[in-house]
Image: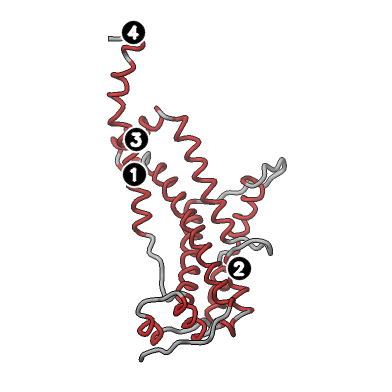
């Protein structure tokens, strides 16, 4: 079916699309920071890279503690801060609950006609074929997202408390709060599922992060490997400066 030019256009669809784009960028930052942090930890795991490689990696990183120790902590804190922002609930902030509530309050302006007009204005290619298969967002979609969030309510509350007491502030009297790697992985997957659900309804697309995750893992390992290989040359250069043969 050949589409005609739609005369329908509203700011709500555009606003929600922009919100989604911003959140996807924040998610990418959280994901990459956590992947590099995990990769640095995994490089020292004998059960992950083998005993010989683990000892070699740890020895290399220990030679550059001034870089790796603060870098690991910065990556850990940054990934948790970004993740906490994604699942925040402040009225003044942009987060998943904000776009869920915005979509719910503007459902009548997120129709097939709005999708068509928005993407025609952007010169979307193959729009005819996409539009034939496109299904607009409905209340059931939003309820499914809310249900997913409710299932993670406990860890989301702990993440907020950890952010407030340990990362955003240094509370004198603070709770003992632990966020495990498995819980961070679960929240990253939850955010991805929700953002993809919105992407499907607003852009008729999803984002594949596999390549970025592999790059984070491989590039981290390569940095440590390059430092290890460079060490003999570095020592060769500094020995004469110290009066050594």
Sequence order check, earlier mark of 3 and 1 = 1
Q: CA distance from mark 4 to mark 3?
A: 29 Å
Pointer 3 or 2: first along the chain? 3
The residue at 41%/84% (across/down) is 131
Task: Give the spatial CA distance, label 3 vs label 2.
Answer: 41 Å
Residue with the mark numbered 2: 97
Mark 4, mark 3: which one is toward the viewer?
4
Dot 2 alpha-carbon crowd within 10 angstroms: few under 14, some 14 to 19, many 20 or more: some
Residue pictured at 30% horizontal, 35% vertical: 226
Residue on which disc 1 sits: 47
Camera-nearest label, 3 or 1: 3
Badges 3 and 2: C-beta atoms under 8 Å apart? no
Would you name the residue on which mark 4 appears? 243
- Mark 1 or mark 4: which is in front? 4
- Which quadrant of the rendered structure holds the N terminus? bottom left
In the rendered structure, which disc, 4 or 3, sits on the residue that comes first in sequence? 3
User: Which is in the foreground here, disc 2 or disc 4?
Assistant: 4
Instruction: Assign a secondary structure to mark 1.
Output: helix
Q: Is residue 117 left or right of residue 91?
A: left
The residue lying furthest to the bottom in this view is: 1
Q: Name which of mark 1 and mark 4 comes first in the sequence.
A: 1
CA distance for labels 3 and 1: 13 Å
Query: Residue 181, image x and y in percent?
Result: 48, 51
Which element type, helix, strand or loop, lies under badge 4? loop
Residue linked to disc 3: 57
């Amino acid at each position: 079916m050949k589409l005609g030019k739609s005369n329908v256009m509203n700011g709500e669809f555009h606003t929600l699309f922009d919100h989604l784009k911003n959140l996807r960028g924040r998610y990418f930052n959280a994901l990459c920071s956590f992947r590099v942090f995990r990769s640095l930890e995994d490089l020292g795991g004998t059960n992950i890279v083998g005993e010989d490689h683990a000892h070699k990696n740890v020895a290399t990183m220990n030679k550059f503690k001034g870089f790796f120790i603060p870098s690991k902590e910065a990556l850990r804190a940054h990934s948790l801060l970004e993740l906490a922002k994604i699942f925040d609930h402040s009225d003044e902030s942009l987060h998943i609950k904000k776009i869920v509530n915005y979509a719910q309050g503007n459902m009548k302006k997120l129709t097939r006609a709005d999708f068509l007009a928005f993407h025609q204005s952007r010169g979307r290619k193959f729009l005819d074929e996409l539009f034939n298969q496109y299904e607009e967002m409905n209340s059931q979609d939003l309820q499914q997202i809310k249900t997913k969030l409710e299932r993670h309510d406990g860890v989301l509350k702990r993440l907020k408390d950890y952010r407030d007491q340990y990362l955003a502030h240094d509370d004198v009297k603070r709770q003992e709060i632990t966020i495990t790697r498995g819980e961070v992985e679960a929240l990253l997957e939850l955010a991805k599922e929700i953002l993809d659900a919105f992407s499907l309804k607003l852009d008729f697309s999803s984002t594949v992060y596999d390549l970025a995750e592999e790059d984070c893992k491989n590039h981290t390992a390569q940095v440590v490997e390059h430092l290890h290989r460079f060490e003999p040359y570095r020592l060769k250069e500094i020995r004469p400066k110290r009066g050594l043969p």
